[in-house]
Amino acid sequence: MASVPSDKFRPRCTGLASSGEDEARGAPVRDERRGGSPAEPGQANGSGLCGRNAGDRTSAFPLANWVATLVDLVRCASTRLPDDVLAALRTSSEAAEMPRAATILSAICQNADLAARNATPMCQDTGTLTFWVEHPAGISQRPIAEAVRQAVAAATARGFLRQNTILPVDGKSVADNVADGAPSIHFEEVDDGPVRIHLLLKGGGCENMSTQYSLPDASLSAGRDLAGVRACVLHAVWRAQGMGCAPGILGVCIGGDRAEGYVRAKRQLLRPLGDESPDPLLAGLEHTLLQEANSLGIGPMGLGGNTTLLGVKVAGASRLPASFFVTIAYSCWACRRQSVAIDPATGLVVEEGEVANE
């Protein structure tokens, strides 16, 4: 997985790392879940940022700054639709041939405008939070993970996230959205530079429409080739109808094992709508699938129209000879993605933007 070039980070959420920074940076931070004592601003209960040498290990991790920056990242993701997604929705609304579809798309855009203006979640389901953290060599992952967890708890307390985490065995709700596997955090070591964090909020309705196929599939007459992949994707779109809150965006992974397929498919949802795969065959498949899905007549919320999908993003992963999986991550219209680059020494924003195509 390649690192994201810095020129791909363009401002998307004005004021990132400013809202709430006084309270986050001006008060001690307590790690309640680990029973730790309050840490002074700019410290993480003795945790060092880097592990290259003894000098680095004694450097204090600016936890309070990190938490404030990440709270604002969550705020932006929850309350502000990315510019390209909102633009696609507006264009689709203006071009809608069916009045019902135009009304639905217009209402979605109005909802997005109100959420951004009032800094309130654009959807009542604030979703599963998945963070991808790209960091240079020598940066310790543990204090960053702790900053992410504390930021999620703080964002929940401030109303940017609803209480949205349920324990699997007893069904109890977790008040601060911090539990085993919540939030989900993926780390990757990259070349030197700032720490880049990408966040995706994905609601349960569209997550339920995500699916995986194993080829060959006789029921679809789908073989182990791109024609078979096409059959799987269009079947998934048809099966979803309006249940995924269409118009949707698809992330697709061809190959991999079952687990890697889902991770890589979901990561494609970070890509801007205007990009395309660097592989010409996959780029052509993305274009074809988008056109064909929008010709199915499913439309916004499944009520008819020519805007069923806003984008299709396809990636590949090596596979075993015995396996050929096609994994589809379905996102609703509220594709809540945000990215930020952070100076690891200060916890402050270097730049904001979106993830580039891999």
Image (cartoon, grey):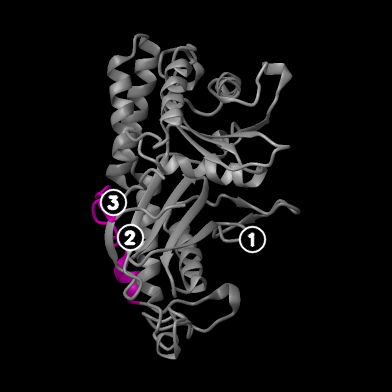
Query: Which label was assigned to residue 180?
Result: 1
Q: Furthest residue to the right?
A: 169
Evaluate if marks 3 and 2 touch, with contact meaning CB atoms under 8 Å apart: yes
Which residue shows up at 39% across the image and 61% down it?
A: 70
Work out which quarter of the rendered image holds the C terminus and state it: top left
- Dot 3 alpha-carbon crowd within 10 angstroms: few under 14, some 14 to 19, many 20 or more: some
For marks 1 and 3, the one nearer the N-term is: 3
Residue at 35% across, 46% down: 356
Please tell me in which quadrant of the rendered image residue 288 appears: top left
From this viewpoint, is residue 312 visible? no
Magenta region's main secondary structure? loop
The range drawn in magenta is: 6-26
Residue 9: mark in rendering: 3
Q: Secondary structure at mark 1?
A: loop
User: Is residue 31 visible in the rendered structure shown here?
Assistant: yes
Which quarter of the figure has residue 64? bottom left
User: Farthest residue in the front direction?
Assistant: 321
**Disc 3 to disc 2, C-alpha distance:** 8 Å
- Of 348 and 126, the residue lying toward us: 348
Q: Earlier in the sequence, mark 1 or mark 2?
A: 1
Separation of marks 1 and 2 at Cα, in angstroms: 26 Å
Q: Whole-Å distance between the Cαs marked 1 and 3?
A: 31 Å
